Amino acid sequence: MHIDEQFDGNSAGLMNRVPVDPYEIEREAVIAMLEREQRSLTASLIALALMAAGVAAMPNPLPMTVLLALRFCSFLYTRKAAARLEQLARARQPMRSARWIVVFAMSLTGVTLGLMLWPPPPDGSMVAVNLVRGVVLVAATLIAVTLAALPAARDAMLASFWLTTFGYYLFHPGVQHPALIAILALLVIGIRIYSSSTGLHIRSAAQMLVENRQLSEDLADALAHAEFLSWRDPLTGLFNRRKLFEETRMEHSALSRHLLTIDLDRFKTINDTFGHGVGDHVLIATADTIREWCHAVGGTSEHHAFRLGGEEFLVIVRGLDDVEVAEAAERLRLRIAGLEDQFEQYPDIAISASIGLASWRFGEGMDDALLRADIACYEAKNTGRNQVRRAA
């Protein structure tokens, strides 16, 4: 994406919705929900302790103790299922099967919570009975709100909770008052409505988080692209003049240095005859050849190539002596001349380069060395082109 496209429309464009992956929104919502579930661990343990206290205060507590044990086992299973879902979400792995396991676990949670509303014995303490029932209702509410980002698991828990209590009345109508069933139904509906609004808030926050992250990544890409263009030639990817002067201003290398100025021969004829599109492809192919040559020439990895403009290129070669750099320059000339094979669809195209070679003496300014390399390049062009000339 170009910089002008990225910021087209000024700040108004940033106000539009950033296109994001729905999976990322779902993932962030699930992670937020599971983090809330982890923070509620203390409250869940307190609820279990309060229910245990209520059960202990009842006469003949064995049946309720069994139900409480089932509730504790369901709690452990749910925690394990939630931990597995969180692991997959954070690893950005498919969560479908883990989510269904959580739905099943929450169905068991609803059943075990409903079982804790088992009709108490007639001589049971009202304080103990109301303590257990109150904790069950509060726990059901908190769990439903915690599960707001997973509506299937939340609804499974609420449905199994109410169906369990309804089963008491259905199979043992004499031990459960119908008014309690109706009240529980209204409570379940209210809890569901409240948790649903909480779920919408969680998903909205997750979407905003993902959008802001995507926007930050887009801005970072745009800034990186702008920085790239500040010191790279956009057509060839080679360094540009600005980078050349920044590079040479900080030149402290103790290695021997040479400059190669490279000028494509009769490039205007290529543009006029075959069009600027073909000319651009010739420039790109030449830049690729220079880049590959820099990697293969040896001596050091500090060779840098630049496009000075038009069909003019410059290479700073470090670590080669005069003989080695002259031989390497000749190989580069032959490689550029061989580019004609890449343009077989244009049989009359002629590609070659004149190269000026100059040593960059220590203590000498880069401008002086570049001037001598340019003069050598002009001599190569004026004496027949497609050759390497060394500066005096």
Image (cartoon, rainbow, N blue to C red):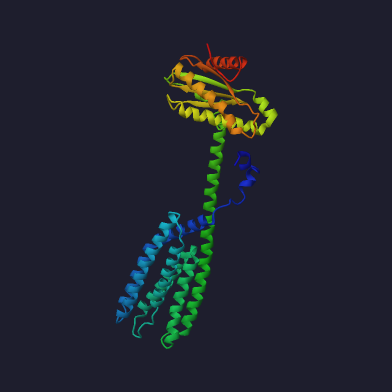
Position in image of residue 374 (x %, y %) = 57, 17
- Which picture quadrant has residue 7? top right
- Which picture quadrant has residue 160? bottom left
Q: How many numbered discs sit on the rendered protein?
A: 0
Position in image of residue 193 (x %, y %) = 53, 69
* Foreground pick, 127 / 223: 223
- Which residue sits at x=42%, y=83%? 168
Q: Is residue 233 visible?
A: no
Vertical comparison of 111 with 16: above or below: below
Position in image of residue 292 (x %, y %) = 50, 30
* Foreground pick, 259 / 93: 259
Vertical comparison of 369 with 234: above or below: above
Position in image of residue 337 (x %, y %) = 57, 26
Vertical comparison of 322 with 213: above or below: above
Q: Is residue 268 visible?
A: yes
* Foreground pick, 160 / 259: 259
Q: Residue furthest right?
A: 272
Figure quadrant of the N terminus: top right
Side (left or right) of 82 relative to 192: left
Q: Residue furthest bottom?
A: 174
